[in-house]
Each structure stands twice: as C-alpha cells, then as structure tokens.
Image (cartoon, helix red, strand yellow):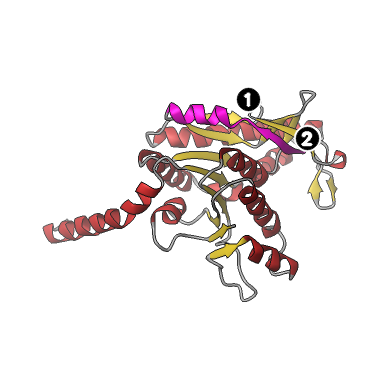
Amino acid sequence: MKTQDMDRNWITTAETLSSALPYMQRYSGATVVIKLGGHAMGSDEAMASFARDVVLMQQVGANPVIVHGGGPMINAMLKRLDIQSEFVGGKRVTDAATMEVVEMVLSGLVNKRIVQAIGDQGGRAIGLSGKDAQLVTCKQTNPDLGFVGTPDKVDASILRNLFDSNVIPVIAPLGAGENGETFNINGDTAAGAIAGALKADRLLLLTDVAGVKNADGEVLTEMSASQIRELTADGTIAGGMIPKTETALDAIDAGVRAVVILDGRAPNACLLELFTDHGAGSLIRK
C-alpha cells in the first residue's frame, strides 16, 4: 500500500473514531440486550462479524446480553428426525417430542455456536438457558399449544453478576415451569422480558427486514409508542412485525429506555445503531 493511501486510511479511521467517541462514552456502563434471530445468524462470516461487534461493544464499556432464536435450525432438525408438527391457529404445537428437539437445538447447537464465535473474537461468553438457576420462570401460554411459555419472572441478578465478571451472557429462550416443566419461549418475548428486568438502555431486535415501514414501504427511523399503536390499528403494521412491535411496547412499559428493530444481516448493524448519528432500523421510544 502506498504511503499516501495509508495516511488517508489513518485519517478516515481517526475521523470515524472521533465521531463515535461521544456515543461510546454514552454507552459506557449501559446494558444492551440483543435478540439474534435464526435468520439473522447467516453464514459463519456473518456470525464472526456479529461476535466481533459484541466484543467491541463490551470493550468500550457496555454490558451486552445476547438472547437468540433458532427457528430454522429447529425446523431442519425436526425434518431430519421425521417429527411431524401440528399447528393451531398458525402456531406450532410444542409437544413432548418437539420440546426435546427444541431444547437440544437451542441450548446445544445454536447457543454454543454463538459462545464459540464470541470466544474466537477474544471475548468471554457463557451459554445459558432460562432454566439455568431459574433465570426465567414461565407460565403456560395456551394449553392447546403444549409446552409454550410466557415469562412470569426473570432473575436479573444472575446476569448482573456475570457483568461484574466481564462475561457476556448468551441465553437460549427456554424457561422453567412451576412444576419443573421446560417451556419454549418466543425469542423476541424472552428478550423483551429480560431487557425489562434489567431496565436495559437498549433492546436491539435483529431480524431480516430493515425496520418498521410506513404505508409507502419506507422505513420509519424513529417512532413513539402511540404511533406504533396507530399503525397497528390501521393495518400498516401487520404480519410478523406485530409481535415484534408488541415486544417493543411491553419492554418500554417495563422500563427499557428504547427498542430498535433492525436488519441483523447488515454488516455492523449493532455498532451502526449505537455509535453513529444516523443509527440503523426503527427506534421506538415511549
């Protein structure tokens, strides 16, 4: 590389760091809960990039918490094991056989892949499920859906102890019932409940769309809770975006400062949201 090119690159890097510095200072000591969806995990390269961002986030003083999904991986394993699924109202019934596969895939395959990726980037992560140390206790959502749970209580002290040890929690969305059952929890719902219990500064919902869109298909970069309700009532927010925005509203009501719905497939999506002027995706505040 020519000396002139190297000088130019150093100047660009210095300018980037200088512009990011106020945001780094703002998030020093802040808790950031990140929901990593199954579709957003992508390739090994994408996972490595995500892990790098999380490690950097911690190095500048933030306390990241990862809550992950794994729907595509669960579907693939059910198909491989020839376990047929039943659906009620468009939702999968999680029977005992399905629950075994869900726990195996989420707590095993997916969880440890993320932990390993963070370790490969120089971070320290520990894999948990909501069952560990009764981190998340649940009530059954609907008997017709089987072992599907809704968070009832989150013990945030477990996660704060990990922050004190400079360890990044990676959480599989499973919970324990009052009678010792294992429940599968929707990943967004689990992330929202955990963020609420921590009174997080940010909840980042990484998905496979750019954010919440208006009637013209344009991404809305900043929204209030009342605007979310209006767009849901008139049908602009529909389909799979409804549960995500509902999670956002519940999290804000529980004390989360802001929620961002953004495309997890975009390079450095989390860093762009936290450490730049323009951010990324749709930011939702009270």
Q: Which residue is drawn at 59% across and 46% down?
A: 255
Q: Residue at x 62, y 71 (%)?
A: 214
Report which residue position mark 2 lands on.
139
Q: Which of 239 and 41 is in front in this view?
A: 239
Report which residue position mark 1 lands on.
132
Q: Nearer the viewer, mark 2 or mark 1?
A: 2
Q: What's the amino acid at mark 1?
A: Asp
**In this view of the protein, can residue 30 be seen by the observer?**
yes
Q: In this view, does 94 lie to the left or right of 53?
A: right
The percent coordinates of residue 74 (x first, y second) are: 68, 40
Highlighted magenta segment, given as a residue range: 148-165
Q: Is residue 216 magenta?
A: no
Q: Nearer the viewer, residue 207 or 250?
A: 250
Q: Which residue is drawn at 82% across and 35% down?
A: 95
Quadrant including the C terminus: bottom right
Quadrant including the N terminus: bottom left
Q: Does the magenta stretch include residue 163?
A: yes
Q: What's the amino acid at mark 2?
A: Lys
Q: Looking at the rendering, which quadrant does residue 217 occupy?
A: bottom right
Q: Residue at x 53, y 45 (%)?
A: 34
Label 2 or label 1, whichever comes before in sequence order = 1
